[in-house]
Image (tube, rainbow, N blue to C red):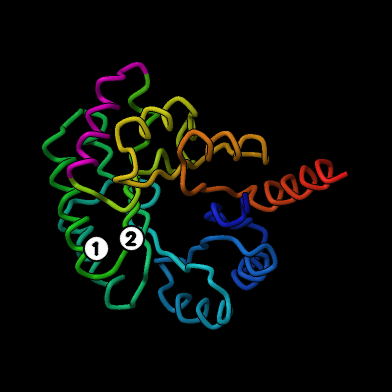
Amino acid sequence: MAVEKYIDYIDDPNDTYEEYLEKAKKYNFRCVFFSEKEPETYGRGLEILKGTDIILAGAIDFPEGVMSLEEKMKEFEKMAAMGVPEVDYVLNQKAVESRDYDAIEKEMKTVAKFCKSNNIKDKAIVEMCKLDGDEEAKKKVCEIALKAKPAYLKTSTGRSWKGADLNDVKLMKHILGNEVKIKAAGGIHNYEEAKAFIEAGASALGASAGIAIVEGERAWKGTVSK
């Protein structure tokens, strides 16, 4: 397993944008992010990452999840015009918290349709922790994703009171199979945890501890090869 190619690396707030991208290059992560509040950083980032296969992604309504669908789609149109290949977006959290499945389905389907026609991989963020204790609600959101077909269904922003949960990822994988990829994010600290999420079915991991995870895999491989 080349664990670095599962990692959507989250920046260290102490690093400059340039330092963040240079670290990503050094460790060859799957994906990094530019700031949607500073769209000029997209072109600058592409220049720094030239010659690598690292994806430079965007985020919409992150981490709040308060935009209307119309507001979100305007942001997606901007991303499409820039040529951004992947976008993480937060499902409307009022709809998630109130179990408004019709609104969730409309949002997921609208975004997925737009993204497919604009060559964008969309990662719909649920905040599964807000559905803790309600397995039926978690199943229902996964079933909606199975119909809407976003590129990824993502567990969490990593900014709520709880991050990724292994049991949630197992449930998501059970329902989504290979139809929709899964991204686990939040609270993944080391290689052992990363490995467990990947084995449970995650295809991508959002992690600020990306370097520690990669170093952990290298140490493990070194031990095994001795």
Q: Nearer the viewer, residue 59 or 9?
A: 9
Going by the picture, which residue comes out furthest to the front? 225
Instruction: Determine whether 8 is above or below 224 in the image.
Output: below
Q: Which residue is mark 1?
A: 115
Instruction: Determine whether 20 is above or below 218 in the image.
Output: below
User: What is the number of callouts on the image?
Assistant: 2
Residue 208: percent from the left, percent from the top?
Answer: 60, 49
Q: Quadrant of the C terminus?
A: top right
Which amino acid is tagged 1?
A: Cys
Q: Is residue 180 magenta?
A: no
Residue 127: percent from the left, percent from the top?
Answer: 37, 36
Instruction: Determine whether 128 is above or below 226 in the image.
Output: above
Q: Nearer the viewer, residue 45 or 142?
A: 142
Which amino acid is tagged 2?
A: Lys
Instruction: Determine whether 83 is above or below 34 in the image.
Output: below
Specify the segment rendered in magenta. Answer: 133-147
- Contact (CB < 8 A) between labels 1 and 2? yes
Q: Which residue is mark 2?
A: 121
Going by the picture, which residue comes out furthest to the right? 226
Q: Is residue 70 left or right of residue 215?
A: left
Q: Name the residue located 34 percent from the left edge and 44 percent from the top edge.
A: 178
Residue 4: percent from the left, percent from the top?
Answer: 61, 55
Q: Name the residue located 29 percent from the left edge and 45 percent from the top edge.
A: 179
Quarter occupied by residue 201: top left
Q: Nearer the viewer, residue 120 or 225?
A: 225
